[in-house]
Image (cartoon, rainbow, N blue to C red):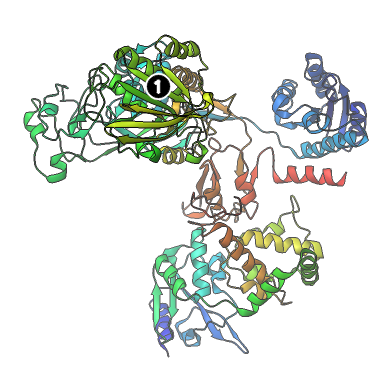
């Protein structure tokens, strides 16, 4: 057993936590693993290659209840936890955040300051494929862009996997399910598919941590991850970083907002 | 099925001249849910209102759309009409067929179609409307006045004389403000102190006024009728219950070389000091920054000399929380110092002074006992130059506005100088003479014609020192921009009036708006001059813009009336146009997920946390947002920001607005 598995066994045996959310090796790829028994701890691995952002499970009341749990977190999870905390969705006393360094040593991040420091030090390099696609679309004119998104989003089957995979899509009732009034047509059609993505991106603006889980979850491999990505970059450029929540909901006299001038 | 009544008003000819009102009524009458539709020449008149009332009763209407002028004009009228006929007033909608249609379009088919569309949208909306009831908020019967200058004094006295309680806080050791520094006041030349000090005493002695000097606002929470203010009572280092105000300590204090704020630096004071002899309260405070004990740990001479043992060192600032129903901000203004002006020597010439410093030189008391003596050597200046508009009306200096009081006080200064220094010579450089006010123009003419003040229209480019004289270089634009050079003994700058220090911070604490120059903003420049955009917070005096004394006093009395009318009510009745967070059946309780982004965005701090608890165990099941209806102003910002659409604005719910828009689009 490696250090991670040993630590997990201890935590579960001692009853410190009821559940550890981590990763295991699946048939073809790494997948999320919910470890509840000490004897299962040896299945736990640590990897950056899991397409799921496991922070998505932290807002699932039916899964974690009022129990104390641990999460084995990579950059993606930690960035999401920080944002979730700003949005009052984390009960810190019920959550233990563990990371594993390259030597296999397990570290617990006990405060949000530590998590923020971790994120600063471990920011992954931008994905060249995503960057290239954004650049390509930026160069298109309005008509080309409209045609591009129409053809891409026409394929969408409205399975809402993007919504399910996103740690920050935690509403009890999504706007897509509101029917008084019916903001979005619930069926698959090009226009309402586009409307849904616009809605998703607007709701993510100023919040998205750029983990890319939405794009990886899409069964049709639609480039929806670049929508949130581009929106985050634009917002950062235009409004700067927000304090205590969402840059769009807070005001500071030193905000950039150069586009208004 | 709804039973809607549609009433189209001709507004005399205001609407009917371009809109076919009869047809609008006919077409509306054909729409689903409309029970009755008619048009009438003056719907707001008594017969018009009777027509609506009768129709409501006869046709058992459950909703009304009135196509008339702007809702700003007659929404209240028609809602009242509906209420009188037994219909909930919020089941009445106004289609603005005047400002939105007839006044802005030519006569024609398209104009009438637009009117029909607007009416159609509202017919759809009103069918979704819910009856609403007004909100009643209790009122704490006490007002807080921030700032003890003439504005604060007048406001406090007027409120107190109406029988309401007032708490006044003043950040400096005495009330009186700038007015107490002035020598004589235009246009009557009566002594400022003589008219002010009796009022200062009245404030201190009034049974309805509680005065806290050396106190600042730390925090303001709550809402109209129910504010909770935290006041910082700065440590005075003196027990006022023991101090008799004998002043012995101030004569013994060894540190006597501190520039006196009251004398604008022209006189000195001690570290333990009463700002001026007529101060209210007339008891000293210790200025910790200059006190030898506080700075170096020893001295305590004041303590040894005090006959009543009133000195208490090392006491911390105290905090006091008070509940008030209304707040009046009367924090006044500042004037720019001479060091703001590089062209006039950056403040390094001792004999280039500000108007406020001149007030002190002309004052009968300190520092010269009313003799005009220049600061550098105490000599009586034989030639004085007054420069108006120093900074003001100069966009290059960042102050495009007119400071308003300078024309008048400069005329007064020159006049006072001529009265006091016989044979003296005074020149005023001015841009324009703005003397709009009762007896103001006559006053300026008197300075020019009777007191022979030399008025030169032109600006001064530079003031510099040469052989002990101040050389003032300017132009006379009335003589073809001819250069003028004057050798002066003293130069008085009418420096711009600016917002008082800390105004921006104070505005942010209270959530009131302010302009780019940090003057507080009124709710409406003409019709709500003493109100702010935050209900229950009022303004008076120069914290709003430069103002003279008569204007300040008028505004102060105005603000006082607003406060009294608010405090005299048992309950405040508010429009029920407020946001609400939805509630639904367990286990969800509400679709609100408690992200509290609404809390960060709400400009009125109206969002609170509500814990939904298990009825048996008391355990918290969920924390959701709750909107305080007393604070909510119905702006709807939270509604648009809520991702899960868990917040709705009563009277303008998402469903109502969506229905209206869809009806407009589909018609």
Q: Farthest residue toward the left?
A: B304
The subunit letter for the residue under badge 1 reads: B
Quadrant in the rendering for residue B142: top left
Is A260 displayed left or right of A110 in the figure? Answer: right
User: Does B482 sit left or right of B656 as displayed?
Assistant: left
Q: Position of residue A174 (x, y in %)?
A: 66, 59
Which quarter of the rendered picture does the N terminus of chain A lie within? Answer: bottom left
Residue B196 visible in the displayed image: no
Q: Is residue B12 above or below residue A107?
A: above
Q: Secondary structure at mark 1?
A: strand
Q: Nearer the viewer, residue B635 or B578?
A: B635
The relative height of residue B483 versus residue A173 in the rendered view (above or below) is: above
- Residue B262 at x, y percent in the picture: 28, 27
Position of residue B66 measured from the top left corner of the image (x, y, whole percent):
80, 28
Question: Does residue A260 appear to the left or right of B403 in the view shown?
Answer: right
In the foreground, B240 or B100: B100
Residue underneath mark 1: B427
Within the image, what quadrant is residue B155 found in? Answer: top left
Image label count: 1
- Residue A160: x percent and y percent? 70, 68
Q: Nearer the viewer, residue B440 or B88?
A: B440
Within 10 Å of disc 1 (Cα), the crowding (few <14, some 14-19, many 20+) is many
Answer whether residue B290 is visible to the viewer in this image: yes
């Amino acid at each position: 057993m490696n250090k991670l598995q040993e630590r997990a066994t201890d935590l579960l045996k001692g009853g410190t936590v009821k559940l550890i959310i981590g990763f295991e090796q699946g048939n073809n790829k790494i997948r999320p693993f919910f470890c509840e028994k000490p004897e299962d701890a040896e299945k736990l691995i640590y990897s950056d290659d899991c397409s799921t952002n496991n922070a998505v499970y932290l807002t699932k009341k039916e899964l974690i209840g009022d129990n104390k749990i641990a999460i084995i977190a990579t950059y993606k999870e930690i960035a999401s936890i920080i944002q979730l905390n700003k949005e009052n969705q984390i009960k810190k006393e019920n959550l233990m955040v563990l990371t594993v360094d390259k030597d296999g040593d397990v570290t617990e991040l006990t405060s949000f300051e530590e998590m923020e420091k971790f994120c600063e030090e471990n920011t992954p390099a931008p994905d060249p494929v995503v960057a290239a696609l954004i650049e390509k679309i930026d160069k298109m004119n309005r008509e080309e862009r409209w045609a591009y998104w129409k053809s891409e989003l026409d394929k969408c089957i409205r399975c809402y996997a993007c919504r399910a995979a996103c740690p920050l899509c935690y509403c009890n009732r999504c706007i897509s399910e509101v029917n008084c009034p019916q903001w979005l047509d619930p069926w698959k059609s090009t226009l309402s598919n586009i409307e849904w993505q616009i809605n998703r991106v607007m709701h993510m603006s100023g919040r998205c941590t750029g983990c890319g889980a939405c794009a990886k979850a899409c069964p049709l491999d639609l480039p929806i991850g670049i929508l949130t990505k581009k929106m985050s970059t634009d917002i950062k450029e235009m409004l700067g970083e927000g304090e205590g929540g969402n840059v769009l909901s807070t005001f500071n006299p030193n905000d950039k907002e150069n586009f208004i001038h | 099925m709804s039973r809607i009544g549609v009433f189209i008003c001709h507004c005399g000819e205001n609407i009917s001249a371009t809109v076919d009102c009869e047809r609008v009524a006919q077409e509306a009458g054909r729409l689903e849910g409309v029970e009755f539709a008619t048009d009438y020449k003056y719907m707001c008149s008594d017969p018009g209102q009777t027509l609506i009332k009768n129709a409501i009763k006869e046709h058992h209407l459950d909703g009304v759309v009135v196509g008339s002028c702007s809702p700003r004009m007659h929404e209240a009228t028609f809602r009242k009409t509906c209420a009188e006929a037994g219909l909930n007033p919020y089941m009445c909608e106004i289609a603005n067929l005047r400002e939105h249609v007839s006044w802005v379009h030519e006569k024609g088919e398209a104009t009438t179609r637009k009117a029909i569309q607007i009416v159609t949208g509202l017919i759809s909306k009103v069918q979704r409307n819910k009856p609403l009831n007004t909100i009643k908020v209790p009122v704490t019967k006490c007002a807080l006045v921030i700032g003890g200058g003439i504005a604060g004094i007048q406001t406090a006295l007027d409120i107190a004389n109406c029988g309401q309680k007032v708490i006044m806080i003043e950040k400096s050791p005495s009330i009186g403000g700038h007015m107490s520094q002035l020598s004589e006041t235009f246009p009557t030349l009566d002594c400022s102190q003589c008219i002010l000090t009796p009022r200062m005493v009245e404030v201190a002695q009034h049974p309805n006024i509680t005065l806290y000097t050396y106190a600042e606002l730390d925090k303001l929470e709550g809402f109209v009728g129910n504010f909770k203010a935290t006041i910082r009572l700065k440590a005075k280092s003196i027990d006022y219950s023991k101090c008799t105000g004998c002043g012995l300590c101030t004569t013994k204090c060894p540190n006597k070389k501190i520039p006196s704020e009251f004398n604008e630096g022209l006189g000195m004071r001690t570290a333990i000091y009463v700002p001026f002899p007529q101060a209210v309260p007339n008891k000293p405070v210790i200025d910790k920054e200059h006190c030898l004990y506080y700075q170096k740990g020893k001295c305590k001479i004041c303590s040894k000399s005090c006959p009543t043992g009133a000195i208490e060192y090392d006491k911390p600032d105290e905090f006091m929380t008070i509940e008030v129903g209304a707040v009046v901000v009367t924090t006044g203004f500042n004037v720019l110092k001479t060091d703001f002006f590089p062209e006039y020597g950056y403040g390094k010439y001792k004999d280039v002074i500000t108007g406020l410093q001149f007030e002190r030189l002309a004052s009968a008391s300190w520092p010269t006992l009313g003799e005009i003596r220049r600061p550098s050597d105490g000599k009586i200046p034989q030639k004085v130059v007054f420069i108006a508009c120093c900074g003001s009306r100069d966009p290059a200096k960042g102050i495009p506005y007119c400071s308003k009081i300078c024309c008048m006080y400069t005329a007064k200064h020159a006049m006072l100088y001529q009265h006091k220094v016989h044979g003296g010579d005074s020149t005023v450089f001015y841009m324009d003479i703005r003397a709009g006010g009762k007896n103001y123009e006559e006053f300026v003419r008197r300075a020019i014609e009777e007191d022979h003040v030399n008025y030169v229209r032109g600006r001064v480019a530079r003031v510099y020192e040469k052989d002990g004289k101040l050389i003032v270089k300017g132009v006379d634009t009335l003589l073809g921009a001819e250069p003028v050079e004057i050798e002066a003994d003293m130069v008085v700058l009418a420096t711009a009036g600016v917002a008082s220090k800390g105004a921006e911070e104070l505005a942010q604490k209270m959530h009131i708006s302010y302009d780019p120059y940090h003057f507080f903003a009124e709710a409406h420049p003409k019709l709500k001059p003493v109100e702010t955009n935050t209900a229950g917070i009022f303004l008076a005096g120069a914290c709003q813009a430069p103002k003279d004394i008569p204007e300040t006093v008028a505004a102060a009395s105005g603000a006082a009336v607003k406060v009294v009318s608010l405090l005299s009510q048992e309950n405040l009745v508010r429009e029920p146009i407020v946001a609400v967070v939805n509630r639904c059946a367990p286990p969800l309780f509400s679709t609100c997920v408690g992200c509290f982004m609404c809390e960060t965005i709400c400009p009125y701090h109206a969002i609170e946390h509500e814990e939904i608890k298990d009825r048996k165990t008391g355990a918290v099941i969920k924390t959701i947002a709750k909107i305080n209806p007393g604070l909510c102003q119905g702006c709807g910002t939270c509604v648009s920001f809520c991702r899960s659409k868990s917040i709705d604005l009563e009277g303008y719910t998402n469903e109502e607005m969506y229905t209206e828009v869809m009806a407009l689009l589909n018609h």
